[in-house]
Image: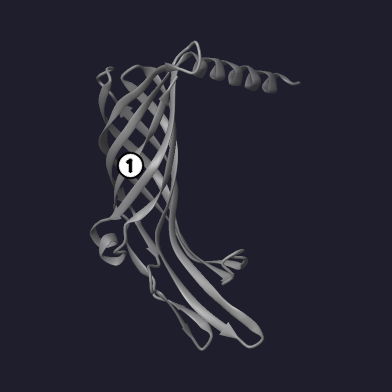
Amino acid sequence: MNKLSMIFLVGLILLASGVQALEQEGGGGLILGKPTGDFGEAMDNVGFGLELNYGIRPVPSLTFGVGGNFMICGSESRQYSLPLVEDFNVNTTNNLAGGFLYTQWRPLSGVVQPYAEGRVGVNYLWTESKIEDQDWWDDDEVARETNFDDFAGYYGGGGGVLIRVAENTGDTQGTNVYLDLKVSYLKGSKAEYLTEGDIEIVNNQPVYSVTESETDLLVYKMGVVLTF
C-alpha cells in the first residue's frame, strides 16, 4: 500500500469514527407534492410518493443531512388490440425523483420539537410507458420505454414538528422515535416535461406535446424519524 492510499484509508477511518461520535438520525415517510405556479397550471395533479433522509447532529439543535424522494405525478392507461394478440394495456406514468442536502434547526428538545428546514437538490422528471397484458392474475410486463426526461435543480425550505412517541428503545445508547409532520416549498428551475394526455399516436408514431416551465412544488410529509 502506497503512502497516498494509506493517507486516504486513515482519513476514512477518522471520518467514520467522527460520525459515530455524533448524534445521528434517519427517517422516511409519505409525501404529497402539489405543483404550483406555471408547473401547477400545466400539471393539474397532486403527486404522491416516498421520502427518505439521514442526518448527523454536531450540536443537538442543528442537523445536516442527505435525502431522496420519489413521486408519481400522474398516470393514464390505454387499451389496444392486434390480430393474433390478446388485448393489452399501455400504462403511462409521469414521475419525479431526486436527491437533496438539508439543514434543520430544532431549538427545543422536549416531547414536541418544532423545526425549520432548508434544502437544495436536483429532481429528475420522466415519463415512462409500459406494455402489460390484461390477465389480472399475473399482470405481465411486456416492454418498458422512457418517452421523455429532463433535470431540474431546486432550493427551498419549510417547517414542521417532531412528536416523540417512544424514548430510549432498542439498545443501551437509546433510540428515540418521532412522528414527523412537515410542509416545504421548493423553488424549481425550468425543465421540459409531459403531463397526462400529452402523448398522441399519429400514423402509429408517438407525438409529444412538451411543456416547459419552472418546477415549483409544495410538499407535505408525514413520516417517522429515529434519533440515535
Q: Secondary structure at mark 1?
A: strand
Q: Residue at x 29, y 36 (%)?
A: 181
The quarter of the image holding the N terminus is: top right
Q: Residue at x 52, y 82 (%)?
A: 205
Instruction: Tell which residue pokes out farthest to the front in this image.
Output: 137
Q: Residue at x 51, y 15 (%)?
A: 171
Tally of numbered tags:
1
Q: Quadrant location of residue 63?
A: top left
Where 208 falls versus 222 (above or below)? below
Q: Is residue 37 left or right of residue 93?
A: left
Where 144 falls versus 220 (above or below)? below
Q: Is residue 39 left or right of residue 145?
A: left
Percent coordinates x, y for residue 101 in the rendering: 40, 36
Instruction: Tell which residue pokes out farthest to the top in this image.
Output: 172
How was this image coloured? Answer: one colour
Q: Residues within 10 Å of mark 1 (few under 14, many from 20)?
A: many
Q: Amino acid at mark 1?
A: Lys
Where 224 falls versus 106 (above or below)? below
Percent coordinates x, y for residue 3 in the rendering: 70, 19
Residue labelled with disc 1: 221
Instruction: Tell which residue pokes out farthest to the right in this image.
Output: 1
Q: Quadrant location of residue 174?
A: top left
Percent coordinates x, y for residue 204 in the rendering: 53, 85
Q: Nearer the viewer, residue 3 or 182?
A: 182
Percent coordinates x, y for residue 191 in the rendering: 38, 60
Q: Quadrant location of residue 17?
A: top right
The quarter of the image holding the C terminus is: top left
Q: Residue at x 26, y 34 (%)?
A: 160
